C-alpha cells in the first residue's frame, strides 16, 4: 500500500470514530435525561443523585490513566476503543430492571468504566490522524458528530415513551440498539502508532508528561471542575422551574443542537487564533451561565440557558483535547489524556456531592452560585499561569 493511501485511511479515522461516537451518544442520550426523574421515582434524594453521579464518574476515571498508559505501552488504540465502547453498550439495558438507586449506580459505573477504557486511546488516535494544524478542526468535528447523535437520542426516547405509555424502562432496554451499530464502525478504523503515524511530530517539538504547561492546565481544570457538577442538576433545575417530564428529551435536543453547531466552529477557530483565548473565554462563560441558572425562575429562561450552555460545550470539549495534543509528544498522548480525564473525573465526585448537598440544604439558587464561584477559581489559576509564563 502506498504511503498516501495509508495517510488517507488514517484521515478517515476522524469520520469513523465520529460515527462510533454518534451512535454511542444516541444510545446514551436516550437514557441520560430520564435518569434523574427515574431516580426520584425510586426514592433517591438530590444528595443521593449527586453521590451516584460523582462516584460513577470519579471512580471509573481513576482507570483512565491506567488504560491510557497501557495503550501507549502496547502501541494499540483500536483494541481499547472496541472494549470500551462494547462495555458501555451492554451495560445500559440493565437499567430496565433496576429497582434501587444502588443498581443504577452499578450500571452507571460500568458504563463509565467503558468510557475510561476507550477515551484516552480514541483521542490519541484522532490527534495523530490529522495534520498538526488541523487538530482543533478534527476534534471539533468529532465532538460535533458525538453531539449530533445526542440530538436524535432524546427523539428516539420520545418515540419509545409514546409507544410504551411513558414507561422509561423500555427506553433503557432499547438503548442497546444504536450502541451495537456503533461497534460496527470500529472495524473501519485504522490502527496507528508513533512510528507509523500519518503526520509525525518533529523531535523536541512538544514535551513529556512533566511539561509545566500541561500540569498547570490540569490543575486549573481540576479546580474548575469542582464547580462543574453533573448535568443532571440542570435537568432537575428545569423540572423545578416547571418543565414536564415529556419535555425533558426535547430540551436536551435543543441543548445538543447548540453543542453540534458550535464544536466545529470553535475547534477550527482555535487552529487560527490559538487555544488559549478560547479556553479563557470558556472558563469565564461557564461561570456566568451557572450564575444565571441560579437566578432563573421562568421556563423561557431555562430554554435560553440550555442553548447558551450548549455553546460552552463547543468552547471547551474539542479545544481542550487539541490543546493537550499541542503540549504532549504523540507517544505519551494517550497517557496524558488519561491523566487529564482522571483528574477531572476525581473532581466530579466532590463537585456533584457539593451541588447535591447545597441544593438540599439551601436550595437550587445557592447550589448554582457555589458552582459558579468554584469555577471562577479555576479560571483565575489559568490566568495566573499565563501571566507567569509571560515573565
Image (spheres, helix red, strand yellow):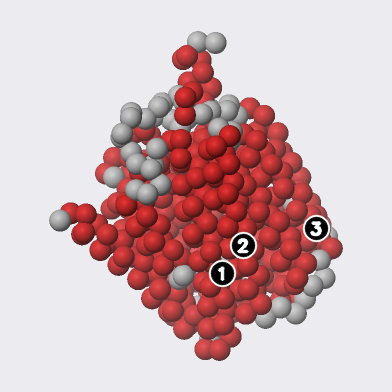
Residue that appears at 58% across and 26% down = 190
Image disc number at residue 60:
none
User: Is residue 298 depicted above or below 278 in this figure?
Assistant: below
Of badges 2 and 1, the one in the foreground is 2
Residue that appears at 55% across and 32% down = 75
* Circle 3 crowding by C-alpha within 10 Å: few under 14, some 14–19, many from 20: some
x then y, percent, for residue 256 = 54, 54
Of badges 3 and 1, the one in the foreground is 1
The answer to whether mark 2 and mark 1 are in CB contact below 8 A is yes
* Front one among 280 and 204: 204
SS for callout 3: helix
| First in sequence: mark 2 vs mark 1 | 2
SS for callout 2: helix
Q: CA distance from mark 3 to mark 1?
A: 23 Å
Residue that appears at 37% across and 55% down = 215
- Return the residue at label 1: 349
User: Is residue 269 depicted above or below 233 in this figure?
Assistant: above
* Circle 2 crowding by C-alpha within 10 Å: few under 14, some 14–19, many from 20: some
The answer to whether mark 3 and mark 2 are in CB contact below 8 A is no
Residue that appears at 64% across and 56% down = 112
Q: CA distance from mark 2 to mark 1?
A: 8 Å
Q: Seen in the image, is 287 located left or right of residue 97?
A: left
* Circle 1 crowding by C-alpha within 10 Å: few under 14, some 14–19, many from 20: many
User: Is residue 142 depicted above or below 12 in this figure?
Assistant: below
- Return the residue at label 3: 94
- Return the residue at label 2: 59
SS for callout 1: helix
- Residue 179 figure quarter: top right
Q: CA distance from mark 3 to mark 2?
A: 20 Å
Amino acid at each position: 500500500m502506498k504511503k498516501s493511501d495509508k495517510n488517507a485511511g488514517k484521515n478517515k479515522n476522524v469520520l469513523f470514530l465520529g460515527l462510533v461516537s454518534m451512535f454511542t451518544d444516541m444510545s446514551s442520550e436516550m437514557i441520560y435525561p430520564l435518569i434523574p426523574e427515574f431516580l426520584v421515582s425510586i426514592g433517591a434524594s438530590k444528595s443521593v443523585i449527586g453521590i451516584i453521579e460523582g462516584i460513577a464518574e470519579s471512580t471509573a476515571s481513576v482507570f483512565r490513566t491506567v488504560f491510557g498508559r497501557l495503550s501507549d505501552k502496547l502501541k494499540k488504540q483500536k483494541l481499547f476503543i472496541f472494549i470500551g465502547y462494547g462495555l458501555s453498550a451492554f451495560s445500559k439495558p440493565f437499567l430496565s430492571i433496576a429497582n434501587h438507586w444502588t443498581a443504577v449506580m452499578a450500571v452507571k459505573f460500568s458504563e463509565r468504566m467503558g468510557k475510561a477504557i476507550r477515551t484516552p486511546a480514541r483521542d490519541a488516535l484522532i490527534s495523530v490522524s490529522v495534520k498538526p494544524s488541523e487538530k482543533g478542526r478534527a476534534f471539533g468535528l468529532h465532538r460535533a458528530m458525538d453531539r449530533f447523535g445526542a440530538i436524535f437520542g432524546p427523539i428516539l426516547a420520545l418515540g419509545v415513551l409514546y409507544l410504551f405509555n411513558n414507561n422509561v424502562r423500555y427506553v433503557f432496554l432499547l438503548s442497546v440498539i444504536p450502541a451495537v451499530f456503533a461497534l460496527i464502525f470500529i472495524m473501519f478504523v485504522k490502527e496507528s502508532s508513533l512510528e507509523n503515524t500519518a503526520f509525525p511530530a518533529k523531535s523536541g517539538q512538544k514535551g513529556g508528561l512533566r511539561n509545566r504547561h500541561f500540569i498547570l492546565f490540569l490543575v486549573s481544570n481540576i479546580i474548575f471542575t469542582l464547580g462543574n457538577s453533573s448535568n443532571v442538576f440542570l435537568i432537575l433545575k428545569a423540572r423545578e422551574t416547571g418543565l414536564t417530564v415529556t419535555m425533558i428529551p426535547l430540551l436536551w435536543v435543543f441543548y445538543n443542537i447548540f453543542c453540534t453547531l458550535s464544536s466545529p466552529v470553535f475547534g477550527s477557530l482555535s487552529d487560527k487564533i490559538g487555544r488559549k483565548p478560547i479556553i479563557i473565554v470558556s472558563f469565564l462563560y461557564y461561570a456566568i451561565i451557572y450564575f444565571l441558572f441560579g437566578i432563573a425562575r421562568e421556563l423561557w429562561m431555562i430554554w435560553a440557558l440550555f442553548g447558551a450552555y450548549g455553546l460552552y460545550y463547543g468552547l471547551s470539549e474539542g479545544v481542550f483535547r487539541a490543546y493537550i495534543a499541542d503540549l504532549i509528544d504523540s507517544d505519551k498522548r494517550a497517557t496524558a489524556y488519561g491523566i487529564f480525564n482522571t483528574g477531572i473525573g476525581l473532581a466530579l465526585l466532590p463537585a456533584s456531592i457539593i451541588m447535591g448537598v447545597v441544593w438540599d440544604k439551601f436550595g437550587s439558587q445557592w447550589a448554582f452560585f457555589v458552582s459558579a464561584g468554584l469555577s471562577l477559581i479555576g479560571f483565575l489559576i489559568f490566568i495566573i499561569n499565563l501571566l507567569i509564563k509571560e515573565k
